[in-house]
Image (cartoon, rainbow, N blue to C red):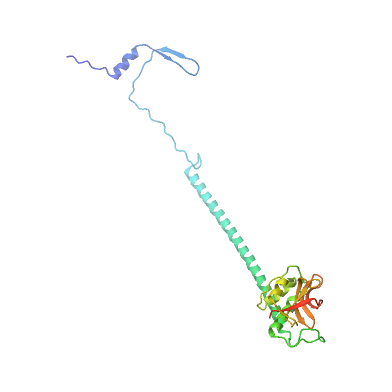
Amino acid sequence: MSKHRRPSALSRLASSAKRPMHISVAAGVAGSVAVTGTVVAVASDQRVPAPRVRPVSLDRPYSGAAAQAGMRVQRADLLERQAREEALARLTAARQRAKLKREKARKAAAKRAAEARVLRTGTSSRSFSRADGPANGPADGPISASAGHVLAVAAAAASGAYYVHGGDGPKAFDCSGFTQFVFAQVGISLPHQSGLQRGVARSVSSPAPGDLVFVYNGGGGSIGHVAIYAGGGYWYEASNPSMGVGKHRAWSTNVSYGRIL
């Protein structure tokens, strides 16, 4: 049995090169093109090397490695300098706020100390062996230390103060705000309203220095004013914007008295 050997690829390519080949190529862009001729195939065992692709830098195209490193250092220095400047600005602002806060607290403390000195001076410089009335006025007799303290505080609080509706001190008062402030200095809490103060005071028929004086509106209706009896026919009071705050002669008989001490 004879063996038929299959022709090699090289012999087939050589034999096909001897024959003319007709190739028709249809182009989809601009109609069709017919190519007729003889094609000669040449076999080669050599490999065509692939083209080398140079890596592209993502930092900055077309710059060298040294230049890119320098730019990264510069950028790091810039960010560090900006961070230092921002931190310094925050620190300066915080120091300024703390300074203003300390100054405000210092002024408030100085104001409280000055007010305390005024109250202490008023307490120590006055004698309470007789009523705090005019030199030739009637005496109300000896008064207690607590009543004397109230009158001293009232005198100090009235000094330099002025009338303001709704005011409760230390330099602006209405009538019940003044009595509330004075009694608060001796540890007694009163409401800021004359009618409510009447409700917590014990009624007395004859006043003593340090008692509250309640003035009624009109012919004896609701309470419209409150003062502190100073003795000798005088009151400490925050009267009105024209009369102000101070020691005034009693100006009404339509009154009642209440004792707090």
Does 89 sit above or below residue 176? above
Residue 110 or 152: which is nearer the viewer? Answer: 152
Residue 146 image position (x, y, % from top left): 68, 83
| Residue 243 in picture, x, y percent from top left | 81, 73
**Any part of residue 199 in sight:** yes
Q: Is residue 70 above or below residue 28?
A: below
| Residue 203: % across, % down | 72, 79
Task: Kindly indicate the quadrant of the structure image that contains residue 228.
Answer: bottom right
The C terminus: image quadrant? bottom right
Residue found at the very far left of the displayed protein: 1
User: Horizontally, is 44 left or right of 115 in the view?
Assistant: left
Count all numbered tags in the image, as a single digit: 0
**How far across and down, in percent of the image, does residue 58 sit?**
48, 41
What residue is drawn where x is 60% and y is 62%? 94
Q: Quadrant of residue 25?
A: top left
Where on the picture, by quarter, is residue 143?
bottom right
Quadrant of the drawing holding the N terminus: top left
Write the residue at 63% across / 68% down. Answer: 102
One can see residue 169 in this view: no
In percent of the image, x 46 and y 14: which residue is there? 33
Indicate whether 80 appears above or below 49: below
